[in-house]
Image (cartoon, helix red, strand yellow):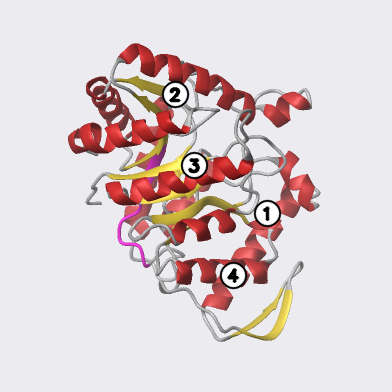
């Protein structure tokens, strides 16, 4: 696998105590325009429901707006939670987004990590969610393969449904499947999905090493879901605050991280359940660590993170918690100008 470092953005689109949803969306759109101008690779959004962690309950709406404000930046959800969608409408949304963006869609697919959120859509248990996920993906593949949709499953049935829109990218946009579960690596790597790892840094490299080995063994297999992708992305998200001096960056970062952590744990703590992941800004076993500092300091910390994880894709999180839009934009600008040129995979 010939690997070159790619860099994109990742955001949860959180609720704000000080800004309206419209102002939050406007800020995310401004970040997309700035990332496009800076030449970053992609901008990926999370999808969550019923939680202040995410107020983009329909990622396609925000992505379609981004597609009209950018020229080169690739756009996508990480992930679209398939059990929450009607399979036919999902296919059409993907096609429309790829057409609106001129073939720039990155397509993350998943089951949804939160059983609490899945209950909103009537998911009775994990197996029910898995069934809906598999059928929605099967319907999507079948629709992409022809001009008429015929499908008979437990949850979806279609007969002679005409299809008048197709993705620009063939046979469909590049697929992502994020995971920190060893059991899913076999499937993800065998089919060549781009992936993102959620978990402590020390667990990342063994996960990616296993992926690379399985991918190399099966890269020529027929029928791979992501066979159109020559080299898969192995991504790690990173919360980042960059300022002219270290103290200011850390003060901003710690305050924003604390708010973000309260959002990501909101539903489980509301119901008195244990946290799913440990999230601490500096702990070795934190699923999401924080890097702050001046550009020179951030270069060293980020390069160390990339070396430890062996990631070939860096997903920067500049806007999190209730960080001021100006601070997030400054971090992006400093990163593009003074940090990115020094980083390698």
* Mark closer to the chain start, 4 or 3: 3
Q: Marks 2 and 1: which is nearer the front? A: 2
Q: State the residue in front, 57 or 106.
A: 57
Relative placement, left or right, of 335 versus 325 is left
The reply to whether dot 4 and dot 3 touch (C-beta < 8 Å) is: no
The reply to whether dot 2 and dot 1 touch (C-beta < 8 Å) is: no
* Mark closer to the chain start, 2 or 4: 4
Decide if residue 187 is in sight here: no
The verdict on residue 72 being magenta is no
Asked which secondary structure carries label 1, the reply is helix
Q: Marks 4 and 3: which is nearer the front? A: 3
Q: CA distance from mark 4 to mark 3?
A: 28 Å
Q: Marks 2 and 3: which is nearer the front? A: 3
Q: State the residue in front, 263 or 214.
A: 263
Judging by the rendered image, the residue that carries numbered circle 4 is 91
Identity of the residue drawn at 52% across and 46% down? 26
* Mark closer to the chain start, 2 or 1: 1
Asked which secondary structure carries label 2, the reply is loop
Judging by the rendered image, the residue that carries numbered circle 3 is 27
* Mark closer to the chain start, 4 or 1: 4
User: Magenta residues?
Assistant: 228-236
Residue 289 numbered mark, or none: 2
């Amino acid at each position: 696998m010939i690997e070159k470092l790619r860099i994109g953005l990742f955001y949860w689109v959180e609720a704000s105590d000080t800004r309206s949803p419209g102002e939050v969306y406007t800020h995310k759109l401004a970040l997309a325009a700035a990332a496009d101008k800076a030449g970053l690779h992609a901008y990926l959004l999370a999808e969550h429901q019923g939680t202040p962690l995410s107020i983009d309950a329909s990622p396609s709406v925000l992505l379609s707006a981004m597609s009209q404000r950018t020229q080169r930046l690739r756009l996508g959800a990480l992930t679209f939670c398939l059990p929450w969608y009607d399979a036919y409408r999902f296919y059409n949304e993907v096609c429309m987004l790829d057409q609106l963006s001129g073939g720039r869609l990155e397509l993350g697919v998943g089951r949804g990590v939160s059983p609490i959120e899945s209950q909103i859509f009537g998911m009775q248990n994990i197996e029910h969610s898995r069934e809906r996920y598999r059928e929605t993906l099967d319907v999507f593949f079948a629709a992409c393969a022809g001009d008429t949709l015929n499908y008979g499953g437990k949850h979806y049935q279609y007969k002679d449904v005409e299809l008048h829109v197709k993705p620009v990218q063939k046979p469909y946009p590049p697929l992502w499947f994020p995971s920190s579960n060893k059991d899913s690596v076999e499937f993800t790597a065998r089919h060549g999905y781009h992936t993102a790892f959620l978990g402590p840094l020390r667990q990342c490299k063994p996960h990616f090493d296993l992926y690379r080995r399985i991918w190399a063994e099966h890269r020529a297999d027929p029928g791979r879901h992501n066979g159109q992708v020559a080299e898969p992305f192995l991504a790690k998200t990173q919360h980042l605050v960059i300022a002219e001096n270290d103290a200011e960056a850390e003060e901003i970062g710690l305050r924003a991280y604390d708010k973000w952590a309260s959002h990501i744990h909101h539903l489980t703590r509301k119901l008195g359940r244990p946290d799913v992941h440990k999230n601490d800004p500096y702990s070795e076993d934190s699923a999401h660590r924080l890097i702050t500092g001046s550009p020179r300091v951030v270069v060293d910390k980020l390069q160390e993170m990339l070396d430890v994880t062996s990631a070939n894709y860096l997903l920067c999180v500049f806007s999190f918690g209730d960080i001021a839009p100006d601070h997030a934009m400054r971090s992006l600008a400093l990163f593009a100008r003074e940090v990115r040129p020094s980083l390698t995979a």
